[in-house]
Image (cartoon, rainbow, N blue to C red):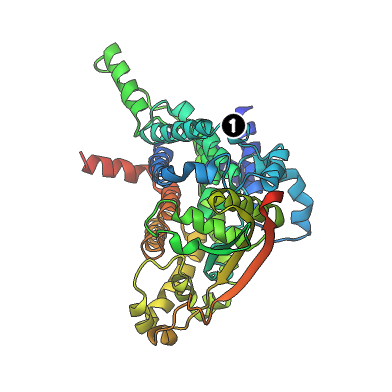
Amino acid sequence: MFGPLRSAIDGWRRFWLEPRDSLTLDLVRVFLGAALFMGYAAVAPAVQDLYGLESWFTGQGRQLYIDNPWRQSALYFFTKPWQVTVFYYAFLGSIAAFTVGWKTRWAKWMVLIGHTSLAYSNPLITYGVDSIVSSALPLLCIAPIGEHLSLDAVARQRRTNRASLDEQPGASVSSRTTTALRLLQIQMVVFFIFSASSKLAGDFWWSGDAIWVALINPEFTNIPIAWLAENYLVVNALTYGTLLIEISYVFLIWQKASRPYLLAGAILLHLGIAVTMGLYFFSAVMIACHLCFVRREWIVHICRLAG
Amino acid sequence: MKATLLLLFSFWHLGAMVVAPMPDCYFKRLITPVYAPYLALFHIGSEWGFFAPDPGRGVEMSFLVTDVMGTEHHLAFSKNLTRSSGTYMRYISLHDNLFAQKPPYIADAASHVCRQYASLTPKSVQFEFGLSAIVLPDDYLAGARPMDASVLQRTRSDVFPCSAL
């Protein structure tokens, strides 16, 4: 009688807690770090205008944020413009360290604090990408990342080599890695559940026109769209294709057989958003987060093929 | 002990993931105060409704700066943004957020404009927004554009005196 129940509990515990190494999360770290570096380095010329003491968000609105003890930013404590500049470049340095896996144990927390601080220092300039990064970073912080694809791993290998030429550094596994990975995977599924379900409430998504309406918005028009107007079936196909990927991802990304197709579909969807709408930072962050569904074996296989 | 803590954290964080984007309902109103500090601390809380329920229309922002002599200066903002610039999406978000015209935030932005154009000795600032039209494919091929002056829906914000900001 208790057999199936015990089996279900064991399965549940394995899903959340079976120790694993951090290779997949390190892949996410590398891509997310590169995307963050690209996104934040690009605003360097306008740091003071966007985040400075005399930015667009400095009066009563900012005070409302400062007064909330849970919405805190290191920038609220700065009184000189140079302090903002130093903070910004220290943050960029942290992202670089996070990406290459140098002192990852510390760098990940610095990136989390830096990102949250900049987001709260001027919420008027935040958009969807900031929320996605905010959702992913705490999960990477709770996991012991940096054991693979990192300078930390290279340094550890060298130390081990010095100790003994034959010895390999032990691949450490952790339940925290599994928990963080599962939460990140579920986060991506939750993202698509709400993204798809809210689209289903829109007339343009049902009529097949949504992609046209999005691309005709001058804020996002990044490619010549006259040919789309002449070949409107493509617009219909892209609109329904977007819905199809978002809805099916929720259910089929978990299956071993269908995962590669859904992953490829989601990555293509975001590459398409990058090219057609110019949302490069958003797309790069989304693709990095989708990589949490890459199986360890695939990475090992690709690494072997690459020699 | 460690396993139990991890499971408890997982359940807690799962709840946060789901509560934040949930549509307004009795359960959400009941549970949000419990999660609000956690969501705020980590800047989690998007509704994930990108381009939903329908993709939005474009916004064009400009300023009407009146100087101490009473002369009006119409200054473009959106038209001066460069598509290839790394700051482009940040400034697009800025004018999209200001378009909502929430009082303390738009006043903050007005004070920024007063400082930015101090050389004009501004007396007051007003924002002007133009909401683009949705142009049908056939109209587009015939030459219509979403930002054409004839179809742009223009609105103006309150006037913000620079001395009070």
Give x and y (percent) for residue A180: 52, 39
Question: The disc labelled 1 sits on which kind of residue?
Answer: Phe
Which residue in the protein does label 1 denote?
A78
Give x and y (percent) for residue B134: 51, 78
Instruction: Classify A251 as above or below B143.
Output: above
Give x and y (percent) for residue A129: 50, 52
Q: Nearest the camera: A151 or B109?
A: B109
Secondary structure, mark 1, is loop
Instruction: Classify A105 as above or below A127.
Output: above
Residue name at image x 41 percent, y 64 percent: A277
Left or right of B145? Residue A127 is right
Chain under numbered label 1:
A
Which residue is situated farthest in the top direction here? A163
Left or right of A198? Residue A229 is left
Which residue is situated farthest in the front direction here? B69
Instruction: Classify B61 as above or below A75.
Output: below
